[in-house]
Structures are given as C-alpha cells and as structure tokens.
Image (tube, rainbow, N blue to C red):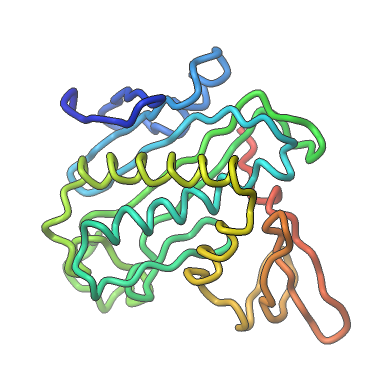
Amino acid sequence: MSDLHFPPLMSGQEVTGGEDPFLAACRQAVLGCEAGLVVYNLGADTLRAAIVLAPEVALSRAMAVLPICGVGFQNALGALAPPEVAVHLEWNGGLRVNGARCGRLRIAASTGEPAETPDWMVVGLELPLWPKSDDPGETPDDTALYAEGCADVEAPMLLESWARHTLNWIARWEDEGTRPLHAEWRGLAHGMGEPVELNDLSGTFLGVDEDFGMLLRDDETTHLIPITTQLEKL
C-alpha cells in the first residue's frame, strides 16, 4: 500500500502476513524511530495499525492519547460511513459500532511510572472488517465493520482518516488542554452511568477524572482506576 498518504509529521510503514503492526511499532520506537510513524497491516478481513508518539508530559497525563485515538477513530469513521452508523468508545480502549463490540485500541509505553515522561508511546488499532462467522447469531455482541452498513468504507481511506483526525486532536490537546477532549469523549463514552466490572471491582461507571481515570462507585466507596492500568506489558 505504498500509495497511502499520511499528514505532515507522519510517515507510513507497511507490514504484511501475520506480523503485528503494534509490536512492530513498539520495536521501532525502542530503536529510536521518529514520532509519527504509522505501522499498518491491511489484511483481507482486518485492519491493524499503530502510531508511535513521543509525548512531552508525564505518563499520567500522556495517557490521554488513548482516548484521543478513540475520538480520532470515531471522527474518521463518521466522515466516511453512513450517518446512521454509531460509534462509541469503551474506557479501556474497546470500540463499539451500532452497540456491538468491533475491535479495540491498545497502548504501550517505555515506562509504567505515572510521574515519568515516556520516551515513546504506541497506540494500536485493531478493527475487524468481516465477521468471523457467516451466522451473526453465534456472537450477537460482536460485529465487524462491513456488517454494519460500512461496505463502502475502504480500509486504506479509513486508516488515512484516522491518522489525520488523531493528529488534529493531539494538536488540540497540546494547545487547549483536556477540556475539549473530555467534552468530545464523554459524548461517545460507552456504559457511563451503568454497572460495570473491572479489575475485580464492580459498581457504577460514574465518569472519569482529569487524567481519564475511571470513577467506579460501589455500595461503600468511589474507586479511582488510573488509565495507566491499560498499558500492555511487552
């Protein structure tokens, strides 16, 4: 896919076959690649990609890139899909299309210490394009993009759009802080105000704090679950 076009400050690197672009991007980040590298694998039935980032703030604040990439995905698909297609974002990076689970975002960083500024961060996108089964009744809570009225959304165009919208939100976050991001994300958040189970805790998902930590209320107290708990250990 050498004809993909990414915005200024971004560059593309394709991987093929079974290679995971998220892990490939992490390897490139460790080797010192430039921020803005987009590693991608456009398979026949799955879109997988990852963006290398180099934030200049402590990890606790830099974790905002996870909801940023989620909002960027919603904006990207919203620009390409029919207007009736609804996209919502799970706090832990899960993606939902028309209410059903449809892929995820994942995140890794050079450090897991909230007060440290990471040398690099990588956010990965995994999006099923076609259902695994011809019988959607087998997995009613899971779906794929092309099963939700998005058959005309080409994967390369969606990837380019995700990169553009994500870069736009990164710029807004750097210039304006988290307020616009919070406002946009809250309107897309899945399950807010509803019962959830997470990290052996159960309660009502009240919302998030300034750094997107989950506020989970049970019968006795309100728990704060830092979003850093979603970092993958490589």
- In which image quadrant can residue 43 be found? top left
Q: Is residue 36 above or below residue 75?
A: above
Q: Residue at x 16, y 26 (%)?
A: 3
Q: Is residue 218 above or below residue 189?
A: below
* x and y, in percent, of residue 96 in the image: 40, 67
- In which image quadrant can residue 44 be found? top left
Q: Nearer the viewer, residue 222 or 134?
A: 222
- As drawn, the residue found furthest toward the bottom would be 219
Q: Quadrant of the C terminus?
A: top right
Q: Residue at x 63, y 58 (%)?
A: 179
Q: Is residue 156 left or right of residue 78?
A: left
Q: Is residue 146 left or right of residue 120?
A: left
Q: Quadrant of the N terminus?
A: top left
Q: Residue at x 29, y 34 (%)?
A: 41
* x and y, in percent, of residue 85 in the image: 26, 71
Q: Is residue 148 left or right of residue 110?
A: left
- As drawn, the residue found furthest toward the front would be 175
- As drawn, the residue found furthest toward the left would be 152
Q: Residue at x 47, y 48 (%)?
A: 69
Q: Nearer the viewer, residue 206 or 170?
A: 170
Q: Is residue 205 above or below residue 183?
A: below
Q: Is residue 149 left or right of residue 167?
A: left
